[in-house]
């Protein structure tokens, strides 16, 4: 059985590989290979994995740290829009989960393809998830 860090790294690699076609939509502009990453203190370990994977795929990662709960997701998406990433990776913080519908709604408003670790985000309106299905466990 893989260790937790191996499973996490495998999941993050899968997220970036699944999203790679979105990152490469603009092959003539290397600065368009940008992925914003929404994270908080509880997902710092996931962020370090995402950074390593992004580097291995020659993708510029733009981490956006959420601080001081309750988080202001509206402000976060306004800030993200200024930097014009091609997609957003939302790491799996338990403080994000109750707001998954709002996160999905904001991503749609910003026309920002968004990837999540859990299916519940997609069920709430998010674009894609890539991770373990916890229901059968």
Image (cartoon, rainbow, N blue to C red):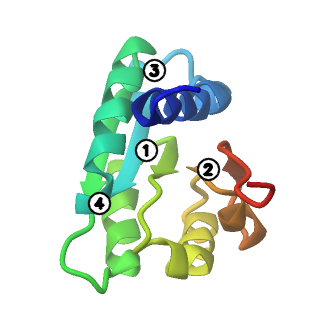
- Mark 4, secondary structure of its residue: helix
Residue bearing mark 2:
113
Residue bearing mark 1:
85
Question: Which of the two discs, 3 and 2, labels the residue nearer the N terminus?
Answer: 3
- Depth check, mark 3 against mark 1: the one in front is 1
* Residue at screen point 68% across, 49% down: 129
- Find residue 29 and name its label: 3
Q: Residues within 10 Å of mark 4 (few under 14, many from 20)?
A: few
- Mark 2, secondary structure of its residue: loop
Give the residue furthest to the bottom: 70
Residue 40 visible in the current orientation: no
* Residue at screen point 22% across, 60% down: 41
Question: Which of the two discs, 3 and 1, labels the residue nearer the N terminus?
Answer: 3
Q: CA distance from mark 1 to mark 2?
A: 9 Å
- Mark 1, secondary structure of its residue: loop
- Depth check, mark 3 against mark 4: the one in front is 4
Residue bearing mark 4:
42
């Amino acid at each position: 059985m893989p260790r937790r860090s191996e499973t996490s790294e495998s999941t993050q690699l899968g997220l970036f590989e699944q999203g790679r076609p979105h990152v490469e939509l603009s092959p003539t502009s290397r600065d368009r290979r940008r992925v914003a990453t929404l994270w908080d203190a509880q997902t710092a370990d996931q962020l370090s994995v995402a950074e390593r994977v992004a580097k291995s795929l020659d993708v510029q990662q733009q981490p956006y740290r959420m601080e001081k709960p309750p988080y202001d997701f509206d402000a976060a998406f306004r800030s993200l829009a200024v930097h014009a990433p091609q997609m957003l990776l939302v790491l799996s913080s338990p403080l994000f989960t109750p707001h998954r519908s709002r996160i999905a709604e904001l991503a749609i408003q910003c026309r920002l393809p968004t990837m999540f670790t859990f299916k519940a985000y997609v069920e709430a309106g998010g674009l894609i998830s890539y991770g373990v299905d916890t229901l059968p466990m």
